[in-house]
């Protein structure tokens, strides 16, 4: 049995914050605002995995209202998500992502981001891909006010769920 999942996230950018993508810090004069460390890509990937497994969404698991998640390391949260997905019997086949930001350029960091995500997800780097896109200068993404991430994943598990099971 296979299932696809999609995740999307957006964070405002602000001075004095780290710009993190999939656990890799990219040198830039702004970074993601967020209750956690703001890693927009880790959040989109978490939601894709949770959605494919029909388990929850990241806001339910790690509510921004809970002080426990203040400045939380998003890779730790992603690890927890992976654990839940694995416990439900699912294995990740592949993950593909798009990060939309006018700046900074993602390409020089792409391999580091792929390796970082793959190691947390427990898959080969070849099963993870990430692409950077600009927003052609349009809207809040184009003016550098925000960064967006999209993720799609494919999960598989040996047998179909029984009736009433997620
Ligand atoms: Mg987020």
Image (cartoon, helix red, strand yellow):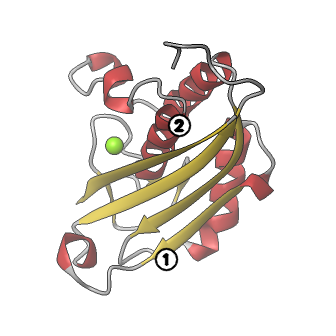
Residue that badge 2 annotates: 52
**Which residue appears at 38% of the width and 21% of the height?**
61
Number of numbered callouts drawn: 2
Residue 108 location (% of width, % of height): 62, 74
The reply to whether residue 71 is in sight is no
From what the image shows, is residue 160 above or below residue 141?
above
Q: Secondary structure at mark 1?
A: loop
Depth check, mark 2 against mark 1: the one in front is 2
Q: Callout 2 environment at 10 Å: few (<14), some (14 to 19), or many (20+)? A: many
Q: Secondary structure at mark 2?
A: helix
Please identify the residue farthest to the bottom as the structure is shown: 136
Quarter holding residue 160: top right
Residue that badge 1 annotates: 105
Q: Callout 1 environment at 10 Å: few (<14), some (14 to 19), or many (20+)? A: some
Left or right: residue 7 compared with residue 136: right
**Which residue appears at 39% of the width and 69% of the height?**
100
Residue 64 location (% of width, % of height): 25, 28
Left or right: residue 25 compared with residue 9: right
Q: Ligand 1 closer than 8 Å to the CB at disc 2?
A: no
From what the image shows, is residue 127 above or below residue 71?
below
Left or right: residue 131 compared with residue 59: right
Q: Which disc is residue 97 wearing?
A: none
Residue 127 location (% of width, % of height): 74, 53
The reply to whether residue 124 is in sight is yes
Looking at marks 2 and 1 on the same chain, the residue that comes earlier in the sequence is marked by: 2
């Amino acid at each position: 049995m296979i299932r696809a999942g999609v995740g999307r996230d957006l964070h405002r950018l602000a001075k004095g914050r780290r710009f993190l993508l999939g656990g890799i810090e990219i040198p830039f004069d702004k970074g993601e605002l967020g209750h956690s460390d703001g890693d927009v890509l880790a959040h989109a990937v978490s939601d894709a995995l949770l959605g494919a497994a029909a388990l929850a969404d990241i806001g339910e698991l790690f509510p921004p209202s809970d002080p426990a998640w203040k400045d939380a390391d998003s890779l730790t949260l992603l690890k927890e998500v992976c654990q839940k997905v694995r416990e439900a019997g699912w294995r990740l086949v592949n993950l593909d992502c798009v990060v939309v930001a006018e700046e900074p350029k993602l390409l020089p960091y792409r391999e580091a981001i792929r390796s970082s995500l793959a190691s947390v997800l427990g898959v080969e780097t070849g099963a993870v891909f990430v692409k950077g896109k600009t927003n052609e200068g349009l809207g809040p993404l184009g003016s550098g006010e925000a960064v967006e991430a999209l993720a799609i994943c494919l999960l598989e598990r040996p047998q179909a769920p029984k009736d009433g099971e997620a």
